[in-house]
Amino acid sequence: MSDTGIETTDEFSYVDKSTGRRATFTPKADEAMVSLERSATSDTLDDVVALPPLLSISQGYNLERGFAAVFVAPSADMATAADALDSVPDVAGSIPVMVDEHGASRYFLPDELTVQFRADVSAAKAEQIIEEVGSRVIVRQRTPGYYTIAVPDGSDLFEAIEAFARRDEVAFAEQFVASAPDLEIVGKGGENLRSILIHMIEEYARHMGHADLLRECVDGRVGQ
């Protein structure tokens, strides 16, 4: 697990290779992203939120994808929370939730990043570079040359981004954001995204006819 208890924001930055600007993030003191091993279950989540430095699941979790967002108790600091999380066998790593320069919370996974190689770099060469840096491919994305990869052992997320961005063969490298990678992500209310969207579609369909009736009463038009 990476050390997440450093007070300064210097380690939470990298140069965005596509723009040349340095992107800097401020770690939140009360919320963390936790990455989980493939063996993690709902019991793992119970063990995580039962830890004294933690309060509850914050924005949601996805066991299949292997992450959870959690609230950190006001009485605890992030280093204490990280040490406690380290004691749970099925926890792979953790990092504070980050706040970007626009004030938005960013939910990065601590042990994954995405890399886009230049168009003239073959898949074989790209994967050779990934292996040379000490990483491994997690997902080969549909876009040619675009990969989700693991943070190399001994590096933290932002160091890994900088290391790949320095390579001439790489177009850009950035964090993997755990927003809603699929419809099975579960929110803090207990429903997954699939159920919420189905409910919204049903409600929308149920009320569409009401709007048509009101319009017909006003101007006599039917349909459309």
Image (cartoon, rainbow, N blue to C red):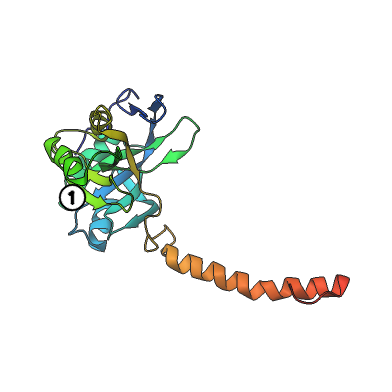
Quadrant in which the C terminus appears? bottom right
The residue at 78%/76% (across/down) is: 213
The image quadrant that residue 82 belongs to is: top left
The residue at 63%/75% (across/down) is: 206
The residue at 17%/43% (across/down) is: 127
Instruction: Find residue 99 and report its horizontal and vertical position in percent.
Output: 43, 34
Q: 143 or 19, which is in the foreground?
A: 143
Amino acid type of the residue that numbered disc 1 sits on in the rendered structure: Val
Q: Which residue is mark 1?
A: 88
Is residue 51 at all visible to an observer of this figure? no
Where disc 1 sits, the SS reads: loop
Quadrant in which the N terminus appears? top left
Left or right: where 213 falls relative to 82: right
The image quadrant that residue 161 belongs to is: top left
Is residue 139 at all visible to an observer of this figure? yes
Question: In the current view of this chain or complex, which residue is farthest to the front?
Answer: 120
* Disc 1 residue crowd, few under 14, some 14–19, many 20+, Cα 10 Å: some
Q: 26 or 151, which is in the foreground?
A: 151
